[in-house]
Amino acid sequence: MQERKEKTKQVSFTVWQKKSFVVAVFFVAIAAILAIALWRGTGDSPTSLTQVDSFLDIHGLAIDPTNPRILYVATHRGLVRGMDDKDWALIGDYRADFMGFTMHPAGKVFFSSGHKVPDAPLMGVARSDDGGSTWKIIALRSQVDFHAMAISRANPSMLYGWYYRDGRLYKSLDGGHSWTNPAAEGLSNANALATDPASDRVVWAASEQGLYRSADGGNQFESAAFAGESVIAIAVDPADSNALYVWVTGRGLLKSTDGGASWQTIGSGLEVGPQDAVGYLAIDSTNPQRLYAATFGASLFKSLDGGQTWRLVKRG
């Protein structure tokens, strides 16, 4: 009888060991899956991340439409990803001066231009299909260094770029692979470009002479507001063509809710130094009340009420 009890104990202990082993393996597997999920960017393959403490400079912003907790920041060292306004890290290993930057409306796909790239003196146009992990120059290698870029939300195959050195507007109809030069009559320069979410024929340009609008895909531009003033940045609400934001030198941040016919000064808490200016704006496509603003001095601000009030996220 005693021998049978001992055998029963041994069998029970063995079963407990097996169950414990299975449970341990299960939790290890879950932990591994979570680790991989955290390691991934917005692409399909694991993305290496290099933690950074500061930006030094900012030349573009984009809020991930699939996860608004993620903000992308184009910098002189490459593309930085932030999670919940912290945990800033360079994505991948492509180190270049990202000057022009725009994101596909669906996320994951990015376009950039710039200089000091590993494989060309001028980037031309580079594209990433894996959330910024890897990049490939697809057009205009060593020919242009766009400081302003915009993708059409109404037609994501259409992109615009402005090259400050030759003073010309560039346009692509095939996802950035080939480019032409619309006449851009009436426009002499562009600090920033923005497209309309409802029409692929409408493109806005912020310039040193004011705010301009084209209704024919960039062939003809007309003055829309702030004639003779320096407009630095512009953003159009992804869900409302009538809602626009601009930064105007000497005025600060302004908003229009009627397509640019009238403007209201906003931006309480957006404290920008006298030698600085907001150069980049990003609007969350899942919640247009959430915005980010970045200055040339690399300060980053956030608004949760449509730009009325702001808080400092990171000081440049």
Image (cartoon, rainbow, N blue to C red):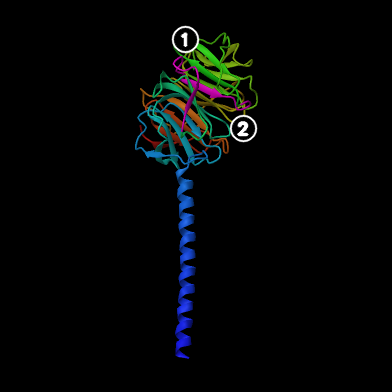
Q: Amino acid at mark 1?
A: Asp
Alpha carbon separation for disc pair 1 and 2: 34 Å
Place of residue 272 in the rendered image (x, y in percent of width and height, measured from the top left): 39, 28
Question: Considering the numbered disc 1 on the image, is that residue within a helix, a strand or a loop?
Answer: loop
Residue at the image point whose x is 35% and y is 30% from the top: 56
Place of residue 111 in the rendered image (x, y in percent of width and height, measured from the top left): 51, 26
Q: Amino acid at mark 2?
A: Ala
Write down the quadrant of residue 249 in the picture: top left
Q: Main secondary structure of the magenta part?
A: loop
Which label is found at residue 197? none
Question: Considering the numbered disc 2 on the image, is that residue within a helix, a strand or a loop?
Answer: loop
* Quarter of the figure that contains the C terminus: top left
Foreground of the two, 114 or 197: 114
Residue at the image point whose x is 41% and y is 33% from the top: 300
Pair 1/2: label in front:
1
Foreground of the two, 139 or 7: 7
- Label 2 crowd bin: few (<14), some (14–19), many (20+), radius 10 Å: some
| Residue 62 drawn above or below residue 148 | below
Foreground of the two, 2 or 254: 2
The residues colored magenta run 134-155
Foreground of the two, 285 or 126: 126
- Label 1 crowd bin: few (<14), some (14–19), many (20+), radius 10 Å: few
Mark 1, residue position: 166
Q: Please give left or right for residue 42 compared with residue 57 in the image.
A: right
Query: Is residue 136 in the magenta section?
Result: yes
Which label is found at residue 239? 2
Q: Please give left or right for residue 161 compared with residue 202 in the image.
A: left
